Image: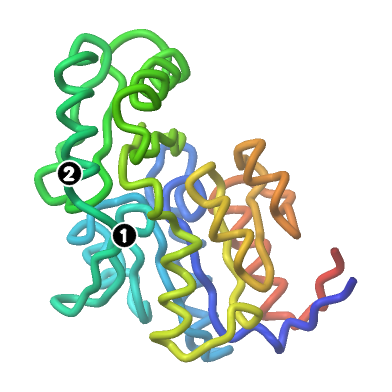
Amino acid sequence: MKMKIERIKCLAIDVDGTITDEKNNLDLKAVEMIRKLKEKKKLKIILASGNAYPVLMGIARYIGGIDLVIAENGGIIGWENKYIILGERTIGERARKIINENFSEIVKESWQNEYRKIDFAYKIKRGSWMEAYEKIKGLMEKKLPEAKVVFSGVAIHVRDRKVNKGEALKKAAEILKFHLEEIMAIGDSDVDVEMLEVAGIGVAVANASEKALRVADIVTWGMRGKGFTEIAETILNEVNLTF
């Protein structure tokens, strides 16, 4: 089917792997495109990331033109000191304790955990990401089934399983007074899957995980920030999308 670009009034954009480069630095061309989309198309812009709320707010302020942030993979929605917490914090805290007690030799806590409320992140210490992910996921399923373990490509996250970017995007749409069909979501990893599914158009950049590629309506040719720039240029040029 064809989707007319003019129906899109809002973009929900992941950060890591989507508007960053190969070194995970912000892709400056992608940042420039976000500013152009805001200026020329008057689109509302949501940043949706696994980062802690203060970190994401900092990114949003320096990019400029961001209307709302979804932090902690859907755990917090807001702007500055006005935010909403979704999910149960104690679930993430219990999961964090289990990981610290059982897997301290293979993973370490993200420095951001001190500032997190719902979603707690871990970095690899030794071994492989997938080995650590499978071990943590297996134990959590036995000891704390209310928790969800997800690998984002840059960290292993644990949180209340009811929390995800898709549910947060539904709430964000209410706040900004949009229909989900008027939102395009752009992402790259497993933590973006629910967001890509509920948005009117789900876009995966070329480096996306298998799950994200599978649910996306559109897959860019370019990877990471280059992929975002590609879809941004499509919007700016008012090219109808076919999928």
Q: Nearer the viewer, residue 183 or 62?
A: 183
Q: Is residue 233 left or right of residue 149?
A: right
What residue sits 55% from the left and 55% below the top? 194
61 or 8, which lies in front? 8
Identified at 63% across, 82% down, the residue is 182
Q: Mark 2 points at which residue?
A: 112
Residue 155 in sight in this render: no
N-term mark: 2 or 1: 1
Residue 70 versus residue 66 in the image, above or below:
above
The percent position of residue 8, horizontal first and vertical second, equals 65, 83
Q: Kindly tell me whether residue 130 is visible in this rendering.
A: yes
Residue 217, percent from left and from top: 75, 59
- Residue, x 59% and y 78% (percent of image)? 180
Where the C terminus falls, by quadrant? Answer: bottom right
| Label 1: which secondary element | strand
**Mark 1 belongs to which amino acid?**
Ala
Q: Between marks 2 and 1, how big is the CA–CA gap?
A: 12 Å
**Dot 1 alpha-carbon crowd within 10 angstroms: few under 14, some 14 to 19, many 20 or more:** many
- Residue type (three-letter) at the residue carrying disc 2: Gln
Residue 79 in percent (x, y) is at 24, 77
| Image quadrant containing the N terminus | bottom right
Foreground of the two, 119 or 229: 119
Residue corresponding to mark 1: 71
157 to 197, vertically: above or below: above
